[in-house]
């Protein structure tokens, strides 16, 4: 069964550094998403991406965040200058239509 | 903004028994989707069940079923014949354009 994959599973970085989180969505899906979950808290929507552009973004998704689909298979989330409060699980998800989203296993980001 | 409320931070059930997890939501839309996701200790988000708002029939997936009350904006999850592997965080989610999650209910299954 096709699934969403994410790399790395765990990323440790120093405050102020740039990180790129990678996702490979399910191959025939058209909509892509990033979410984050701070430990012990709810899952929060960051951004949705369709037709090579951002379709929705939350107030969390400020100028330090960007997304890209560089090669037709990968979908990346870049955080330009990480802060301590960016430490969280980051989930990628994809969907064929605007209905069920399938989530990847997540990347645990730790900012020191 | 749409909000999703899970009023039970924790629930416990005896193995083989039935448990119901509550979820309410707030929306002015008439067409939307509702989901329950399971998050085990591995922290992966696993889809359990989904419901389209335009369908009156409650969704069922094996031991999992929902009680969808559109007028009351309620979407509870019933787990029958609970198993040890059902122990996890359960998140209710609402979607029209974007997805909103509830705060989650931690389910413990006692042997």
Image (spheres, rainbow, N blue to C red):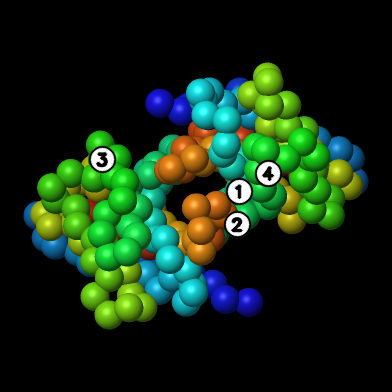
Neighbour class for label 2 at 10 Å: few (<14), some, many (≥20)?
A: some
Question: Which residue matches tag 4?
Answer: B51
Residue labelled with disc 3: A60
Question: Among all residues in the image, which is located at the extreme top?
Answer: B72
Left or right side of A97 for B59 = right
Name which of mark 4 and mark 1 comes first in the sequence. Answer: 1
Q: Between tags 4 and 2, which lies in front?
A: 4
Q: Separation of disc 2 and disc 1 at Cα? A: 5 Å
Q: Secondary structure at mark 2?
A: strand
Residue B82, horizontal then vertical, whole percent = 83, 47
Q: How many numbered marks appear?
A: 4
**Point 84% across, 50% down: residue:** B63
**Residue where numbered disc 1 is placed:** B37
**Marks 2 and 1, the one that precedes in the sequence:** 1
Please give left or right for residue B105 compared with residue A81 in the image.
Answer: right
Query: Where is residue B39 drawn, in percent x and y?
Result: 58, 51
Q: CA distance from mark 3 to mark 1?
A: 22 Å
Nearest the eye: A8 or A96: A96
Front residue of B72/B31: it is: B31
Badge 3 and badge 4 both on one subunit: no
Q: Is residue A112 visible in the rendered structure shown here?
A: no
Q: Secondary structure at mark 1?
A: strand
**What is the spatial separation of the Cα atoms under label 4 and label 2, in whole angstroms?**
15 Å
In which quadrant of the rendered view does residue B59 lie? top right
Disc 2 chain ID: B
Front position in the image: A46 or B108:
A46
- Does dot 3 land on a helix, a strand or a loop? loop
Name above or below for residue A103 compared with residue B34. Answer: below
Mark 4: few/some/many CA within 10 Å (<14, 14-19, 20+): many
Q: CA distance from mark 2 to mark 3?
A: 24 Å
Query: Relative to the observer, which residue lies in front, B73 or A106?
Result: B73
Residue carrying label 2: B46
């Amino acid at each position: 069964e096709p699934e969403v994959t994410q790399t790395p599973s765990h990323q440790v970085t120093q405050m102020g550094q740039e990180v790129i989180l990678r996702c490979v969505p399910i191959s025939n899906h058209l909509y892509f998403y990033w979410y984050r979950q701070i430990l012990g808290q709810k899952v929060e929507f960051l951004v949705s991406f369709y037709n090579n552009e951002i379709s929705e973004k939350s107030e969390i998704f400020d100028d330090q965040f960007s997304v890209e689909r560089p090669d037709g298979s990968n979908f990346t989330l870049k955080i330009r200058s990480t802060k301590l409060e960016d430490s969280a699980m980051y989930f990628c998800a994809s969907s064929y239509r605007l209905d069920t989203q399938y989530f990847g296993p997540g990347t645990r980001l730790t900012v020191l | 903004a749409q909000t999703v409320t899970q009023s039970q931070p924790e629930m416990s059930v005896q193995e083989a028994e039935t448990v119901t997890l509550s979820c309410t939501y707030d929306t002015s839309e008439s067409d939307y989707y509702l989901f329950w996701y399971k998050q085990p200790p591995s922290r992966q988000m696993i889809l359990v069940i989904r419901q389209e708002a335009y369908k009156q029939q409650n969704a069922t997936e094996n031991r999992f079923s929902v009680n969808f009350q559109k007028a009351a904006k309620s979407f509870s999850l019933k787990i029958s014949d609970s198993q040890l592997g059902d122990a996890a965080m359960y998140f209710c989610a609402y979607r029209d354009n974007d997805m909103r999650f509830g705060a989650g209910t931690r389910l413990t299954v006692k042997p």
